[in-house]
Image: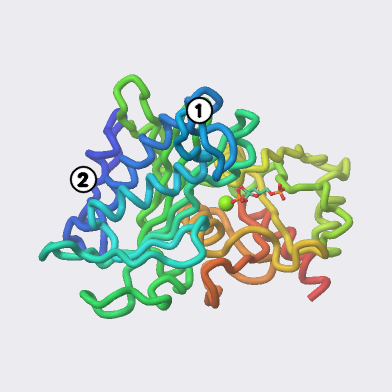
């Protein structure tokens, strides 16, 4: 049950029994993500000030210490929080070529969960002080407990996700997540370092009037997407719609969920399979989207039913208010 001013920590514990296999493991895992989020948030808020965060990886700062870009810092922070607390048996990150097995130290019981993460999505926005995000996706491993994780544990379709969430480092920092029982959003009070439940039971409006796409790629788009854009821009009924594109999936998605809208990153002659990664970006956002009553497809089929074949696989992504996604799918179907 969602109560106003409930903290995220209280909410995780109170809703523990929602999890199919409730042993407290998933709660500990979510708590570790919450902790890492606060650490990353601190650095995001100081972005542009802290010397370590400025500059490119590989350069040394004046103290001779290796400089770290914000996305590297975020990646290290999440990996550290998850491995040191032994709340996962493996991690795959958009920033790492291979998955990271987590081995249990001493005799402590190793978690059954794997996490896939995009630690700092939209990171090119960080250089210009515009909102960035974190996206995470959690699965139960499929290989036997106690054995080292394998690639199979990570290459699961999105419909097997146990939980997924995102953090938006915006005017305020929000963590939004689902464990398959609706979507709830928590806002960080930076003075106390506590996330409070601010957006219980978030839902996607069935319809909307915002479309988010990088229109600079127009010439590369499939004809179905070009037709849909013409439809959005036509003066008829409640159209033309409004175009809004931050270039940070988390922020574009978040706004569209609150106001009603669609996000599209299609395939194109310049991006054969689109740009976004199935495992780190599309599946978790699709899970949240569906849990909030929206729809997420690759233009033809449900994102969460795609069987992944590699860790960094890209797919076209159409996600948002159900009626808007249905409309663009109708147009895509004209060009199978
Ligand atoms: P990233 O994970 O390298 O940051 O790329 C993902 C981001 C999304 O957040 C955003 O919607 C998209 O890339 C923007 O791409 P483009 O600049 O091609 O429009
Ligand atoms: Mg990303």
Q: Position of residue 278 (x, y in %)?
A: 56, 64
Q: Which mark is residue 48?
A: none
**Quarter of the view holding residue 99:** bottom left
The residue singled out by tag 2 in the image is 14
Q: Is residue 225 left or right of residue 53?
A: right
Q: Is residue 290 visible?
A: no
Q: CA distance from mark 2 to mark 1?
A: 48 Å
Give the position of the C terminus as an image quadrant.
bottom right
Where disc 1 sits, the SS reads loop
Q: Is residue 271 left or right of residue 77?
A: right
Please name whichever residue, 65 or 257, is drawn nearer the observer in this view of the structure.
65
Position above or below: 191 against 300: above
Q: Position of residue 216 (x, y in %)?
A: 83, 47
Q: Is residue 195 visible?
A: yes
Mark 1 burial class by Cα count in 10 Å: few <14, some 14-19, many 20+: few
**Which residue reaches farthest top?**
191
Mark 2 burial class by Cα count in 10 Å: few <14, some 14-19, many 20+: some
The residue singled out by tag 1 in the image is 62
Label 2 CB less than 8 angstroms from ligand 2: no
């Amino acid at each position: 049950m969602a109560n106003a001013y409930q903290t995220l920590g209280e909410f995780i514990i109170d809703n523990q029994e929602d999890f199919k296999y409730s042993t407290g493991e998933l709660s500990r895992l979510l708590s570790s993500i919450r902790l890492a989020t606060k650490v990353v948030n601190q650095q995001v808020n100081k972005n542009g000030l802290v010397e370590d965060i400025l500059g490119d990886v590989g350069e040394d700062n004046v103290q001779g210490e290796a400089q770290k870009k914000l996305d590297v810092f975020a990646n290290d922070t999440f990996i550290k929080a998850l491995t040191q607390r032994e709340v996962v048996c493996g991690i795959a990150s958009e920033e790492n070529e291979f998955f990271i097995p987590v081995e249990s130290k001493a005799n402590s019981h190793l978690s059954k969960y794997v996490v896939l993460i995009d630690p700092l999505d939209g990171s090119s926005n960080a250089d210009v002080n515009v909102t960035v995000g974190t996206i995470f996706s959690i699965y139960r491993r499929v290989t036997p407990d106690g054995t080292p994780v394998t690639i199979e544990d990570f290459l699961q379709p999105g419909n097997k996700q146990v939980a997924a969430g995102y953090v938006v480092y915006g005017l305020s920092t929000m963590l939004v997540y689902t464990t398959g029982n609706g979507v709830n959003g928590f806002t960080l009070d930076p003075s106390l370092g506590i996330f409070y439940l601010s957006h219980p039971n978030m839902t996607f409006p069935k319809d909307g009037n915002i479309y988010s796409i990088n229109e600079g790629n127009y010439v590369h788009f499939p004809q179905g997407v070009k037709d849909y854009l013409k439809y959005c821009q036509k003066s008829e009924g409640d159209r033309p719609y409004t175009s809004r594109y931050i270039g940070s999936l988390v922020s574009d998605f978040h706004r569209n969920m609150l106001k009603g809208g669609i996000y599209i990153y299609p395939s194109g002659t310049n991006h054969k399979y689109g740009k976004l990664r199935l495992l780190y970006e599309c599946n978790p956002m699709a899970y949240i989207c569906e849990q909030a009553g929206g729809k997420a497809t690759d233009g033809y089929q449900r994102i969460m039913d795609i069987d992944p074949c590699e860790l960094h696989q890209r797919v076209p992504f159409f996600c948002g208010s159900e009626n808007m996604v249905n409309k663009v799918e109708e147009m895509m179907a004209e060009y199978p």
